[in-house]
């Protein structure tokens, strides 16, 4: 077993004086971290991170953590570029989509000795040991999980009720389409919908999961075969992309401008009351409730991924965010110490509440407060994952595959290509990245 990571006093070399006139006093060592969260802003996850940093700094008076918020969709790529230039942050958050990129870059420190030093009770307490396996590539643990996420179908319960639609209708993609038609409304009589049935973010930057990706996996299964061979130019995937494009073209339940809308902007529009439903990461639930405008936040509901038939649920993608220490950092041991702190039991309790994230430890999920009605959405996600959890391959480069799906949908909507022709191009682009 690897030796347990121990505390270390701050290194003296290169440190400035803490204050003028105090001879010999040293400024704290600062650990720089890139994440999409900003602990100075409101929000459940932001508050959790702020409290985690404060507790770490109290326990380690010689260390400080400086957060530099980043755009989440480009953070991993920028980290790899920075590592190659010897100018990366000490810690970066990487999502499951970029684990293969991280491993290929060899920029991450091996965190296995840190985990080996954990007591057995902490290792056995993990809800998703598969997340550790996904981050272990070539016998090296490149990252450790901080929070789990899954894309779910978020829906306005009030609009469904007004349309006479039960939530059970959303078990199939045909039911989703029927509900979207019923929820699309022109409330001011100008001939244009004020509320669209379903929102999409189809831009090729700042993108995320869309119905087409989920429907494709539901019909075909994995998008990659042996050796990370891309499987996109198939009838099953073409059906899913055409179905998504037809939300705009034929059924007019999604605005045409969605082809240029980012995932983040579409989420903001959903919170603003423009859409009746949308595929969104469950981790955004609290944010949407907090920013809901013109509708009651308690009407926000979530349902599992639909499928083409009602006999089984669609794929519930297991995703999440991981903590990574830069291997080349002069503060790598301090960075690992903070990652260890950021994922311990006390921190995981904070990510859960007030962070509003799915419990990552069994002991956290068993707390009495988790049984309260306001946290039913967190229990639901756990149930969805248990029923139909699906993992994308961590050894395949698939983060831009989501953008390939969006580009294929754009080309169909704009009349540039058929779904199959667009997917042949998408398949080649994805394969070239392997």
Image (cartoon, grey):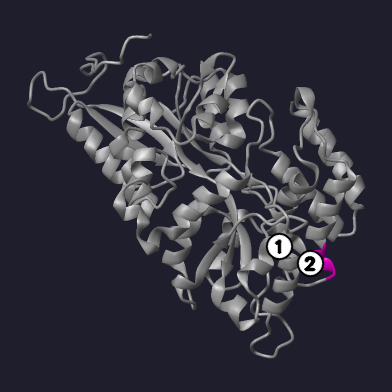
Quarter of the view holding residue 227? top right
For marks 1 and 2, the one nearer the N-term is: 2
Secondary structure, magenta segment, majority class: helix
Q: In this rendering, is residue 304 above or below 112?
A: below
Q: In this rendering, is residue 75 above or below 31?
A: below
Secondary structure of the residue carrying numbered label 2: helix
Quadrant location, the C terminus: top right
Q: Determine which residue is flagged by label 2.
A: 248
- Count the numbered circles shown: 2
Question: How far across and down, in percent of the image, does residue 328 sit?
Answer: 45, 16
Q: In this rendering, is residue 124 above or below 156?
A: above
Residue located farthest toward the bottom when viewing the structure as drawn: 189
Q: Is residue 97 left or right of residue 29?
A: right
Measuring 58% from the left and 39% from the top, which residue is drawn there? Answer: 74
Quarter of the view holding residue 137? top right
What is the CA distance from the residue labelled 1 to the residue labelled 2?
8 Å
Q: Are marks 1 and 2 in contact (CB under 8 Å)?
A: yes
Which of the labelled discs sits on residue 155, or is there none? none
Q: Nearer the viewer, mark 1 or mark 2?
A: 2
Question: How far across and down, in percent of the image, does residue 22 sit?
Answer: 7, 25
Question: How far across and down, in percent of the image, does residue 356 sit?
Answer: 40, 53
Question: In the rendered structure, which segment of residues is drawn in magenta?
Answer: 246-250
Q: Determine which residue is flagged by label 1.
A: 258
Measuring 69% from the left and 39% from the top, which residue is drawn there? Answer: 400
Question: How far across and down, in percent of the image, does residue 253 sit?
Answer: 74, 71
Q: Is residue 318 magenta?
A: no
Measuring 69% from the left and 91% from the top, which residue is drawn there? Answer: 189
- Residue 199 visible in rendering: no
Q: In this rendering, is residue 87 above or below 403?
A: above
């Amino acid at each position: 077993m690897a030796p347990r990571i121990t505390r270390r006093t701050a290194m003296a070399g290169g440190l400035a004086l803490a204050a003028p006139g105090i001879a010999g006093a040293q400024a704290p060592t600062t650990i720089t971290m890139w994440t999409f969260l900003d602990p100075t802003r409101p929000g459940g996850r932001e508050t959790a991170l702020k409290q985690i940093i404060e507790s770490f700094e109290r326990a380690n008076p010689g260390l400080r953590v400086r957060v530099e918020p980043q755009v989440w969709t480009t953070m991993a790529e920028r980290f790899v570029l920075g590592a190659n230039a010897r100018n990366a942050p000490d810690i970066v958050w990487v999502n499951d989509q970029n684990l293969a990129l991280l491993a290929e870059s060899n920029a991450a420190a091996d965190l296995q000795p840190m985990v080996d030093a954990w007591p057995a009770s902490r290792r056995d307490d993990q809800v998703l040991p598969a997340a550790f396996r996904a981050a272990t590539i070539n016998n090296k643990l490149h990252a450790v999980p901080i929070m789990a996420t899954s894309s779910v179908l978020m829906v306005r319960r009030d609009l469904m009720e007004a349309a006479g639609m039960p939530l059970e209708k959303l078990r199939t993609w045909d039911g989703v389409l029927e509900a979207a038609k019923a929820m699309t409304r022109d409330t001011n009589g100008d001939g244009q919908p004020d509320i669209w049935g379903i929102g999409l973010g189809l831009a090729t930057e700042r993108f995320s999961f869309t119905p087409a990706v989920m429907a494709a996996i539901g019909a075909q299964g994995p998008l990659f075969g042996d050796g990370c061979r891309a499987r996109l130019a198939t009838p099953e995937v073409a059906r899913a992309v055409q179905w998504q494009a037809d939300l705009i073209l034929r059924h007019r339940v999604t605005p045409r401008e969605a082809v240029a809308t980012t995932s983040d902007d579409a989420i903001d529009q959903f919170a603003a009351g423009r859409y009746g439903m949308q595929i969104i990461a469950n981790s955004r639930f609290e944010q949407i409730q907090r920013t809901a405008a013109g509708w009651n936040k308690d009407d926000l509901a979530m349902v599992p991924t639909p499928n083409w038939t009602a006999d089984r649920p669609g794929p519930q993608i297991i995703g999440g965010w991981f903590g990574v220490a830069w291997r080349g950092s002069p503060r790598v041991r301090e960075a690992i110490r903070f990652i260890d702190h950021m994922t311990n039991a006390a921190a995981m309790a904070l990510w859960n509440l007030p962070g509003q994230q799915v419990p990552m430890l069994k002991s956290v999920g068993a707390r009495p407060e988790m049984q309260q009605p306001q946290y039913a959405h967190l229990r639901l996600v756990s149930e969805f994952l248990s029923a139909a959890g699906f993992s994308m391959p961590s050894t395949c480069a698939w983060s831009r595959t989501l953008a390939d799906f969006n580009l294929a949908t754009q080309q169909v909507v704009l009349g540039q290509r058929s779904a199959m022709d667009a997917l042949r191009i998408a398949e080649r682009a994805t394969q070239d990245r392997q």
